[in-house]
Image (cartoon, rainbow, N blue to C red):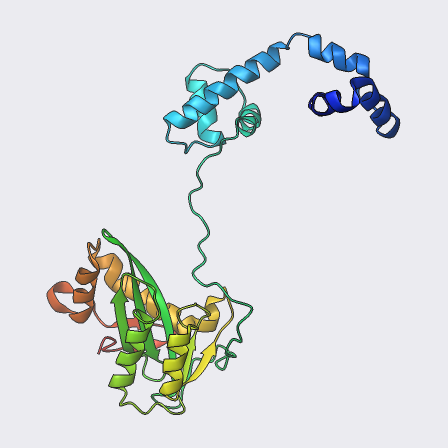
Amino acid sequence: MIRYIDMFADQFGVEAICRTLGATAGGFITSRGYRAAKTRQKSDRAVRDEFLIDEIKRLHVENFGVYGIRKMHALLRRQGWVIGRDQTARLIKLAGVSGVTRARRVFTTRKDSRLCQPADLVERDFTAVGPKRLWVADIAYVATWSGMTYVAFITDVYSRKIVGWNVAATLKADILPMQALDMAAWQSGGDLTGLTHHSDHGSNYLSMVYTERISELGITPSTGTVGDSYDNALAETINGLFKTELIRRRGPWKTVEQLEIAMNRPGSDGGSQPMEDESYGSTEEVWR
């Protein structure tokens, strides 16, 4: 109330503001109360709050701006302040600082509602009557010392074999998934009429350059729903096995090239063995 009156006192006058708002808002401060509040000395609590707010700002900066309520409360107690957790939370809010969160939600798939999306032709039925009838595609993320690395896989549902893959330091459609698709097409002999390509709604799979290449090969596109891993469960399983049997066993990885060499030479010098999963059976010779 005091701040509100201060904002408009020069324009309307204190008495006029208090009289007008007092008639519409019950319990609004009177002009006499306003002047008493302006001349009254600050309470001990207000003085202590102001000092603690400055102290919290200083400690927050000194600790790299990462302390939240719990750690700031413990730090203030170690500094000798008798302060409760709720009071710390209130003062942190007044100080305008906050702690860092452990993890942030990452959106790896962003749907563009303006585009006409391919229908879901698979509907979670990951079976096929023969090879080159249904492929599933997805991208795995691998952390290396040189930065994030991405691995695109294309798996034949009938044989459970990875028929195409590519490693790159970028998610660009013409570099990462496109080369995996070209590898799969080359290994399959070229004629892919009647084959269905199933993926998520990632922008690299729905990009113009990728969809045009699918059309050139005579492939029918299919996509699941956004944020639903079950709609591409087989591809997600392949990604999980890849990380379990190669990435975590032989890491940490330094460069993109080191990871690509390891994938080109499975089984050598203690490398990855064929991946198996109870839900989908053996993926014997999955790399070949």
Residue 29: name its quadrant.
top right
Quadrant for the C terminus, please. bottom left
Return the x and y of residue 268 as percentages of the image width and height.
Answer: 12, 68
Residue 1 in which image quadrant: top right
Residue farthest along the left direction in this orientation: 269
Q: Is residue 87 above or below residue 33?
A: below
At 83% from the left edge and 21% from the top edge, which residue is drawn? 16
Above or below, 131 against 249 in this view is below
Relative image position of residue 157 (x, y in whole percent):
37, 81
The answer to which image quadrant residue 152 occupies is: bottom left
Nearer-the-camera pick, 103 or 130: 103
Residue name at image x 14 percent, y 64 percent: 270
In this view, 279 is above or below 98: below
Q: Position of residue 287 (x, y in %)?
A: 23, 75
Report if residue 26 is visible in the image: no
55 and 39: which is toward the camera: 39
**Residue at 44% across / 14% down in the picture?**
80
